Image: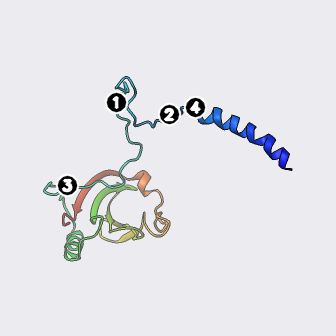
Amino acid sequence: MRSSLFRLVPVVVLLCGVACQQNVVLTTPTDTPAGGNTGITSTPTPVAKNTTTPVPNGTMVQFDTTSRPGWLEERIQKLSAEPPQNPAARIMRYRFEDQVVYYETLGCCDQYTNLYDKNGKLICHPEGGITGKGDGNCRYFTKHRTEERLVWQDARQ
């Protein structure tokens, strides 16, 4: 056994000597090349898009105040009296299934959005809930809504 170990030692030393003498240089993509310039002149476009549209402080948002029904004014007053939500609560007006409807978003996460008819009657919850798909009673709202108008958005921070 001892003699076989001694025969292996010169082979290991020989292999280590050859492999260990190699000058391996490791570079990363952030290293400047020897020429001093990468030649790349453009910045790649980000792939991801924001999921919300922020409104900067001090920016006036133009609201569509065209013939707001009384019930809607009351709803806006009620939302304004509550603590601000994140993201901000807002109300949009759309045309959906040949009628004027009002779409209300409320705060974060699993909360349902509300869709009201022109008289303030709750039609359905198009989005929100645990699945994010609402209550299932107006699945086609997001695909078939038209004539979008911002009626109100809470400007408080």
Q: How far apart, in angstroms, are the residues tagged by discs 4 and 2? A: 9 Å
Three-letter amino acid code at the position of disc 2: Val
Q: How far apart, in angstroms, are the residues tagged by discs 2 and 1? A: 28 Å
Discs 2/1, front: 2
Mark 4 or mark 3, which has the lower sequence index? 4
Q: How far apart, in angstroms, are the residues tagged by discs 1 and 4? A: 37 Å
Q: How far apart, in angstroms, are the residues tagged by discs 2 and 3? A: 48 Å
Write down the residue under mark 2.
25
Write down the residue under mark 4.
22
Three-letter amino acid code at the position of disc 1: Ser
Return the x and y of residue 56 as percentages of the image width and height. Answer: 19, 55
Q: Is residue 102 left or right of residue 33?
A: left
Discs 4/3, front: 4
Three-letter amino acid code at the position of disc 4: Gln
Would you say the residues marked 4 and 2 are in contact, meaning their CB atoms lie under 8 Å apart? no
Label 1 neighbourhood size at 10 Å, few (<14), some (14-19), many (20+)?
A: few
Q: How far apart, in angstroms, are the residues tagged by discs 4 and 3? A: 58 Å
Query: Is label 4 in a helix, a strand or a loop?
Result: loop
Write down the residue under mark 3.
56
Write down the residue under mark 1.
42
The residue nearer to you, when weighing 6 against 76, is: 6
Q: Is residue 110 left or right of residue 23?
A: left
Mark 2 or mark 1, which has the lower sequence index? 2
